[in-house]
């Protein structure tokens, strides 16, 4: 349903949405794994908002840390020293997924972090080119959109900066390499990347940027050997490896950093979302000490008004305390078992579920018209999302929030979820999928 001509759904532009869409429920609060409306209706958040509220809503340790900070100091110039910034950076860098030290550059979000990581790589290497995967999302600022491989790049492309080349990464369910053999897929993907590097001039490649677990542009946990192969190819041509952990970091895949779960150490990693449990906007670039040292005697020519904002730093510290005291960085491994079982059952029940896949508390349900041909239920990168918009609205009406992009549903619950709440949520998803199936086969 659409709003009538002349009516306005809201006075703000809703991101990534047709503005004339029927408005959904108005949320006024959130606690734990639920959001709620003014009249008390509860909605189970199965996607942690936008895969960011990893601690659930309103975690008391984060809220208390924010409250205390607002009472002492809300803002100090990012060029001046601040006790809370120093405390948080110290703790964050001590946990970097590599040996030899780290430093951090703070931003307000993930797109900015990718933008800045690439600029840092270019300055440090003196090279121009960056390679990124076709299936990827790295943000929507001009720089980050240009790095994005998927169709969310297209509308921002007019002014997109150059120096970016793309490659195909493995995708066993929709193999760009024409094979059903997962090990062969990895071999061919690495051979392809090697050829891209050759063609782009290895001596001019500053960085390879990749999500170590592909998020909203396809949800793919790469097969063993692929990321290690990318690491080796980057090393061989003298390029830096940047992991975009904006979505897959902070416990999402069962470790604080996804790089640890996949066993490959990058040179820099971008983060955002879960770093504060989504209680405050914060992003950043964690970099190896030697990269940071390159700026010890020359200008570090990047920064934002809110780089290292004291209240965001406090939220980060509070979140770190919550993740660690409640064992939430690794809880995704337990949730992985529940999700695997629950989603396999959904696949058995519903013919429009083509594939379920994922790692940790980060799974995708890929919807198809036909399991044999694997034709997507709505076109991948397609303009007409109405069917999926309606599915998402139906789920909201049933009391579940689920992130949907094209024919992919991302199931990424808060890491605090109980097995019972997850089972209840998946039962609702299953019912909504059956209703969707009835609609498309009618
Ligand atoms: N990188 C990845 C992998 C993301 O998933 C996102 C956002 O969803 C971004 C970057 C952009 O982050 P932000 O929206 O905070 O700019």
Image (spheres, rainbow, N blue to C red):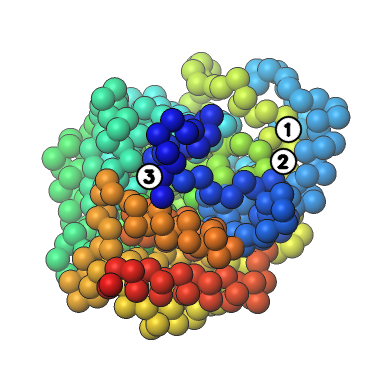
Location of residue 81 (image quadrant): top right
Res. 198 visible in picture = yes
Q: Judging from the image, what secondary structure is the residue with disc 2 in?
A: helix
Q: Judging from the image, what secondary structure is the residue with disc 3 in?
A: loop
**Residue where numbered disc 3 is placed:** 137
Q: Label 3 neighbourhood size at 10 Å, few (<14), some (14-19), many (20+)? A: many
Between discs 3 and 2, the one toward the N terminus: 3
Instruction: Give the residue drawn at x 61%, y 26%.
Output: 307
Q: Establish whether ligand 1 lies closer than 8 Å to the Cβ of label 3.
A: yes
- From this view, report whether residue 234 is shown above or below residue 375: above
Q: Position of residue 275 (x, y in %)?
A: 62, 45
Circles 3, 2 touching at the beta carbon (< 8 Å):
no
Q: Label 1 neighbourhood size at 10 Å, few (<14), some (14-19), many (20+)? A: many
Residue 315: assigned label: 2
Q: Judging from the image, what secondary structure is the residue with disc 1 in?
A: helix
Left or right, 288 with respect to 81, comes to left
Closest to the observer, 284 or 15: 15
Residue 311: assigned label: 1
Q: Label 2 neighbourhood size at 10 Å, few (<14), some (14-19), many (20+)? A: many
Instruction: Give the residue drawn at x 25%, y 69%.
Output: 369
Instruction: Give the residue drawn at x 42%, y 39%.
Output: 4
Circles 2, 1 touching at the beta carbon (< 8 Å):
yes
Mark 1 and mark 3: Cα distance apart in space: 28 Å
Closest to the observer, 405 or 80: 405
């Amino acid at each position: 349903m659409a709003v009538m001509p002349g009516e306005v759904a809201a006075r703000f532009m809703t991101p990534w949405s047709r503005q004339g869409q029927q408005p959904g429920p108005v949320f006024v609060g959130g606690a734990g794994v639920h959001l709620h409306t003014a009249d008390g209706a509860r909605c189970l958040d199965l996607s942690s908002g936008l895969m960011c509220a990893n601690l659930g809503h309103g975690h008391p340790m984060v809220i208390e840390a924010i409250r205390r900070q607002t009472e002492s100091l809300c803002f100090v110039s990012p060029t001046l020293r601040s006790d809370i910034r120093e405390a948080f950076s110290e703790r964050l860098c001590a946990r970097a997924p590599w040996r030899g030290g780290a430093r951090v550059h703070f931003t307000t979000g993930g797109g900015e972090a990718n933008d800045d990581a690439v600029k840092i790589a270019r300055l440090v290497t003196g090279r121009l080119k960056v390679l990124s995967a076709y299936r990827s999302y790295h943000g929507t600022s001009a720089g980050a959109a240009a790095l994005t491989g998927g169709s969310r790049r297209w509308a921002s492309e007019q002014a997109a900066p150059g120096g970016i080349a793309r490659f195909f990464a493995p995708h066993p369910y929709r193999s760009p390499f024409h094979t059903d053999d997962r090990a062969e897929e990895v071999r061919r993907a690495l051979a392809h990347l090697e050829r891209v590097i050759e063609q782009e001039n290895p001596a001019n490649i500053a960085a390879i940027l990749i999500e170590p677990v592909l998020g909203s542009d396809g949800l793919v946990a790469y097969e063993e050997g692929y990321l290690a192969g990318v690491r080796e190819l980057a090393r061989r041509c003298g390029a830096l490896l940047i992991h975009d952990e904006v979505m897959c970091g902070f416990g999402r895949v069962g470790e604080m950093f996804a790089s640890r779960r996949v066993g490959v150490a990058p040179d820099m990693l971008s983060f955002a979302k879960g770093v504060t449990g989504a209680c405050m906007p914060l992003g950043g670039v964690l970099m190896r000490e030697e990269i940071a040292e390159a700026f010890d005697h020359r200008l570090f020519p990047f920064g934002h008004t809110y780089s290292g904002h004291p209240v965001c730093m406090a939220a980060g510290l509070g979140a770190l305390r919550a993740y660690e005291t409640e064992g939430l960085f690794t809880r995704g491994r337990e949730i992985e078992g529940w999700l695997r079982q629950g989603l396999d059952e959904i696949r058995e029940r519903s013919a429009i579920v083509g594939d379920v896949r994922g790692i940790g508390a980060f799974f995708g349900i890929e919807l198809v018209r036909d399991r044999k041909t694997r034709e997507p239920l709505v076109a991948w990168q397609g303009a007409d999302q109405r069917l999926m918009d309606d599915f998402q609205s139906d789920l909201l009406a049933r009391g579940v929030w689920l992130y949907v992009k094209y024919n992919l549903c991302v199931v990424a619950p808060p890491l605090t979820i109980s097995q019972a709440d997850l089972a209840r949520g998946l039962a609702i998803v299953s019912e909504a999928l059956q209703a969707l199936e009835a609609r498309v086969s009618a």
